[in-house]
Image: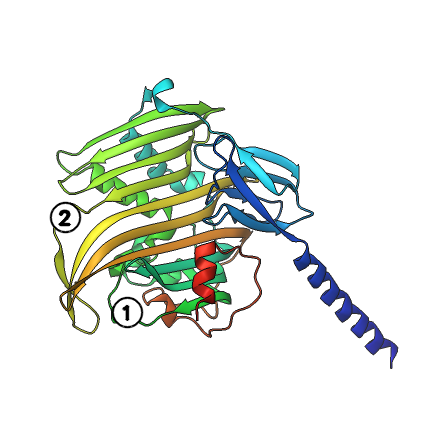
Amino acid sequence: MTEHLSRKLLFTGFLFLYSFFFSQNLKNLKIIGAEDGKPIPNARIILPAEIIYTNDDGVAMIPENTINLEVSKVGYQTEKLTQFTPIIKLKLLYRDIEEIKITNIDIKKLFEDVRDNYSKRYYSKPSLYDIIFKQKYTVDDKTNSLVIAEAKFWALSNAYNFKFSNREDYDKFVQIELNNIKYFKFIKSDLDSISQTNVKKNEVGGNFFLNYELRRILLHINVAGAKYSGKIVADDNNEQTILFKIETMPGIKVEGTLLYNAIDKVITHYELDFDQSGFAPYKVNDKNGKEYEFQAGTGTISFDFYKKNNKYLPSQANIESDGYITFNGEKHSRTYERKVTFQTFREAKNESLPNRIDMTKNMWENIPNHEQKDSKIALSKEEQEFIDEK
């Protein structure tokens, strides 16, 4: 055996052992409430090199040798730890809203200020992220499809570009490349051709960006006769917790929660709950021309940001919604969930991802293969049962 080959085999063996021991050292970290001991889903864990969120069971998988992590969740006190611990208890920020001092705030003025200064306060140059992409549908309360993938996310300015959108040239400002399909399962249904989200062409990619949501929420506020309110319910070192409500036309209810940095004048967390169940059902044609009746329901839109090297960067963009579809005389409930976790960030150029997906299509039409690979993504109990189901 030559010396060169011997070194090559030794190096390859080292990489294998490193990978093996690294994967073996991944441990479950569980986040629970200090008062009730219940799991806290979607709690954010900021590690030195990446960002992870807990699953629906309050669990995330992180390296056991992790040091210097920060755990946060809206409504709870942030915890900073120097080393790994298997269970972290978060204390409530406030117990009873009736006991706290409430200060009114002009929520319209706040939204307009953040919108008008968006590119100055959030990072606005070309960026490339490693993301975890999760999308799930249910039909009649049963999971119908689930895809969880490691992916690349490229953004021209970390904002929705209305000019390119009007031209239907979405690739100019946002691209996604599915690199590693961790979990994929799709159960064929008679409702597959019916779009759950009913996304209009000029809205493709909108729910990835807070500036798009700000434009949408201000359209609601500016409707003639609309009523709106904002209340500061907590102020911790100039990070304000703000509750807001908007009443527009009958049949629509909107309320939400913000975390607002009063010094930097940025929204670091945005969560909006909407209820459109008061609207009457309406008839729609699917892409094959089949007619069905759609009734909107409730949903949640949320965004998270964090500060790194004086830049405000996204850490998550989520949307969940439900509704009802009447097709061939039968009524079916449907839910849709998409979560995008921005794990790592680096500055980029005006580049193009070679294997980018077509975001105007259903996700399973973009899946390059059905291969399932080892993953450090912690599935919830419900998701694992769906994947394992024969």
Q: Residue at x 47, y 51 (%)?
A: 341
Q: Earlier in the sequence, mark 2 or mark 1?
A: 1
Q: Between residues 91 and 342, which one lies in front from this camera angle?
A: 91
Q: Position of residue 267 (x, y in %)?
A: 40, 36
Label 2: which secondary element: loop
The three-letter code of the residue at mark 2 reads Phe
Question: Picture quarter containing residue 286?
Answer: bottom left
Q: CA distance from mark 2 to mark 1?
A: 24 Å
Q: Between residues 116 and 364, which one lies in front from this camera angle?
A: 364
* Left or right, residue 194 beside residue 344: left
Q: Residue at x 13, y 33 (%)?
A: 225
The three-letter code of the residue at mark 1 reads Asp
The quarter of the picture where the C terminus appears is bottom left
Q: Which residue is mark 1?
A: 192
* Left or right, residue 381 beside residue 162: right
> Can residue 331 be spotted in the picture?
yes
